[in-house]
Image: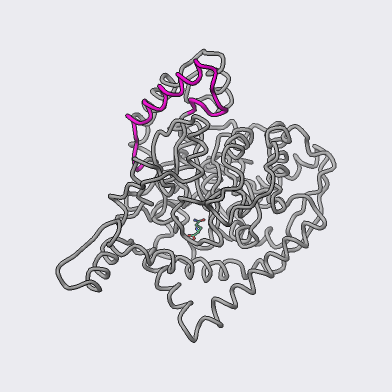
Amino acid sequence: MELTELTLRELQRMLADKKVSSAELTRAFLARIAEADARVNAYVTVCEDQALAAAAEADRRIAAGEAGPLTGIPVALKDIFNTEGVRTTCASKILDNYVAPYDATAWARLKQSGAVLLGKLNMDEFAMGSSNENSAYGPTRNPWNPETVPGGSSGGSAACVAARMAAAALGTDTGGSIRQPASHCGVVGLKPTYGRVSRYGVIAYASSLDQVGPVARDVEDCAAMLQAVAGHDPADSTSVDTPVPDYLESLREGVKGLRIGLPKEYFIEGLDPDVKAAVEGAIAVYRSLGAEFVEVSLPHTDYAVACYYLIATAEASSNLARYDGVRYGERVDEGGGLIDMYNRSRAAGFGDEVKRRIMLGTYALSSGYYDAYYLKAQKVRTLVRQDFLDAFAKVDVLLTPVAPTPAFNIGEKTGDPLQMYLSDIFTIPVNLAGTCGMSLPCGLSAGGLPIGLQLVGKPFGEADILRAGHAFEQATVWHEKKADI
Ligand code: GLN
């Protein structure tokens, strides 16, 4: 079998047994990128020289018996993680020339463990989008069908893993950006609890929602990646100092007696029939494995998307104020003075969706409107969170669809932002609640596109959703299906 087809843990075993070197592995993935990425456009930057140097260093560590769990494993990062010496664009023209002077903590941890960075992955500009069409570097295509979107905003991360162009990747999820693309690309993506993984060095979109997480081939690989990045970081005051469980160990526990909640608001009219059938199939699998189902209610679900688009845009308008052409990023200076330079730089550097959100957010925060919009949205957010906490008093995990439809066609929703925003109707409430959720493959549509299942856990309940996901994979074959690209 091709090296690029192997799972992360198979690669770990081969490296440990010295059946392959990291240099060979890295070259195999670079060759795969050279062959397939013209059709997918998952990478914004491929850092071949750095990758080969890191692989040589990994081989030295392995030979010296100093290997960590990820030593020699080729991975890739959404282009939102600062990486010292490799440019970080956030898929925006305004950061086209930006090379960070330091590493994001999540990447620093992978690097310390010995992972090899292949490159930086395409995304929606500043993580704003659900289709990867809002990138200054062109859309990423879904490896299952290049006419369709891979989802977003971590579309490059999901497409890259699906097309076997890295062993695993990291993404970020503010309203669904790891789970929705994972669902559309037939891979596993996990958004950890807010505070579980450091966001230091990750370019901020909406700071009260953003969270870093893994995208991988299956649940076990996903657990291994989470293990490597989770934990407190003194450099991020929102990261929580609570012990990180042994995620791989907890996978073995099975789901007998696990109480799974089905939120009735998530099984609605308008759910695509193939998605509905796949999720119902997953419920039947869990039943046969001895899990118990309980109907629960998340009564404020209807308000979540509106609430999210107020909070996220408000925070974005504040976070993106720093891109003014002065310290970094594109500068357009035509001699009209400082304010003119700011305006021109921002007008030229930001794409349309980013501008739309800055305007929405600035409006929501302006005096006279603050109480009616931002403050009200914060109150609604508390109600949404309380819904989840009430449900978790009765059940261990929740099971829901990830997205209302399989991947849609490129161009299909670009003219209608509201339709695009509704792609995240089942993922956004999890971010508002600050808890964890994972997408894993549970079926294929009539058109042959992957469908994802969402498992939502209690705050810091990543081990529960990972073990539930692993049990599902043990009983099914969906995670073994692969895109033909
Ligand atoms: N699609 C949502 C948005 O555009 C979520 C994005 C994300 O999670 N980064 O805001």
Q: Please state the horizontal and vertical placement of residue 65, each as a whole percent of the image.
A: 54, 17
Residue 423 inside the magenta-drawn segment: no
Q: Nearer the viewer, residue 467 or 321?
A: 321
Residue 67 inside the magenta-drawn segment: yes
In this rendering, would 120 be left or right of 173? Answer: left
Q: Please state the horizontal and vertical placement of residue 125, each as a whole percent of the image.
A: 39, 55
Q: Nearer the viewer, residue 300 or 144?
A: 300
Q: Please state the horizontal and vertical placement of residue 229, each as a whole percent of the image.
A: 56, 41
Vertical side of 4 occupied by 405: above or below: below
* Extent of the magenta region: 44-73
Q: Please state the horizontal and vertical placement of residue 222, each as a whole percent of the image.
A: 60, 37
Q: Nearer the viewer, residue 196 or 372?
A: 196
Residue at (39%, 37%) from the top-left corner? 119
Vertical side of 398 occupied by 46: above or below: above
Vertical side of 471 occupied by 28: above or below: above
Q: Nearer the viewer, residue 242 or 258?
A: 242
Residue at (57%, 48%) from the top-left corner? 233
Image-quadrant location for residue 433: bottom right
Q: Which residue reaches farthest bottom?
A: 368
Residue at (62%, 38%) from the top-left corner? 227
- Count of marks placed on residues: 0
Residue at (35%, 29%) from the top-left corner? 35
